[in-house]
Image: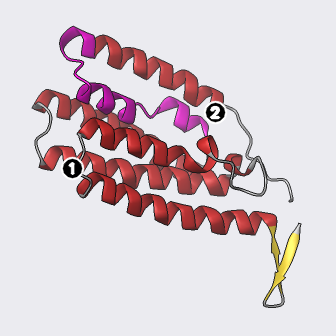
């Protein structure tokens, strides 16, 4: 399906890419407002960030094609926006000294580990790297703010990491990008 805009044919995929770019900017702005201006608990901030992350492909189906979220274009922008959002959250937590330094080291380590995976993915466009470097940052920070400490923290963090490898595997491992015309 395509439309003519200013005598230019615009495909459904181009429309979806435009929607994605607009939603990405909105998501970054909303994340900034949630993290730095919304006067709620850190756990609620994290939950709102998780909801914002899923608005386009998880919670709402806003794209013209149901497989748009599997395209290379989507995956690249989504990983960049995730990184920006998580960077803001990590900065906020560090700046306000909201966690013990050992917990901060854990979060910085998880964030850096995923960042290595994202940079490698962006360099190679091989989605398998997203499996090798799973995103367990957001779930771990949420659990820390929900009060899991000591041995529980170690056990739960390990379980999250394993769970996220399984999730990332199902989403990315040996997956071909959807490149169909629509």
| Residue 30 relative to residue 174: left or right | left
> Is any part of residue 126 visible from this angle?
no
Label 1 sits on a secondary structure element that is helix
- Give coordinates of residue 105: x percent, y percent: 19, 33
Q: Is residue 22 above or below residue 44?
A: below
Q: Is residue 128 magenta?
A: yes
* First in residue order: circle 2 vs circle 1: 1
C-alpha separation, residue under disc 2 versus residue under disc 1 = 29 Å
Closer to the camera in the image, 144 or 161: 144
Magenta region: 126-153
Label 2 sits on a secondary structure element that is helix
Q: Is residue 177 magenta?
A: no
**In what quadrant of the picture does the C terminus appear?**
bottom right
Q: How many marks?
A: 2
- Give coordinates of residue 40: x percent, y percent: 24, 45
- Give coordinates of residue 106: x percent, y percent: 24, 29
| Residue 153 relative to residue 65: left or right | left
Dot 1 corresponds to which residue? 92
Residue at the image position 12 percent from the left and 47 percent from the top:
96
Q: Residues within 10 Å of mark 1 (few under 14, many from 20)?
A: some
Q: Is residue 64 above or below residue 107?
A: below
> Is any part of residue 141 visible from this angle?
yes
Residue at the image position 47 percent from the left and 64 percent from the top:
26
| Residue 85 relative to residue 18: left or right | left
Q: Is residue 104 above or below residue 63?
A: above
Q: Nearer the viewer, mark 2 or mark 1?
A: 1
Residue at the image position 80 percent from the left and 65 percent from the top:
12
Dot 2 corresponds to which residue? 171
- Give coordinates of residue 45: x percent, y percent: 31, 44
**In what quadrant of the picture does the N terminus appear?**
bottom right
């Amino acid at each position: 399906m395509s439309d003519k805009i200013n005598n230019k044919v615009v495909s459904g995929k181009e429309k979806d890419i435009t929607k994605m770019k607009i939603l990405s900017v909105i998501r970054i702005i909303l994340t900034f407002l949630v993290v730095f201006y919304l006067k709620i608990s850190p756990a609620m901030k994290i939950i709102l960030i998780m909801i914002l992350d899923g608005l386009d492909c998880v919670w709402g189906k806003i794209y013209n094609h149901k497989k748009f979220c599997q395209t290379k274009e989507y995956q690249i922008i989504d990983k960049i926006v995730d990184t920006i959002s998580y960077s803001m959250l990590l900065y906020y937590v560090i700046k306000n000294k909201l966690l013990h330094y050992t917990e901060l080291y854990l979060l910085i380590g998880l964030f850096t580990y995923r960042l290595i995976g994202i940079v490698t993915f962006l360099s190679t466009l091989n989605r398998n790297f997203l499996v090798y470097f799973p995103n367990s940052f957001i779930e771990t920070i949420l659990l820390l703010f929900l009060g899991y400490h000591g041995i529980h923290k170690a056990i739960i963090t390990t379980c999250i990491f394993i769970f996220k490898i399984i999730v990332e595997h199902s989403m990315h491992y040996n997956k071909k990008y959807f490149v169909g015309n629509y």
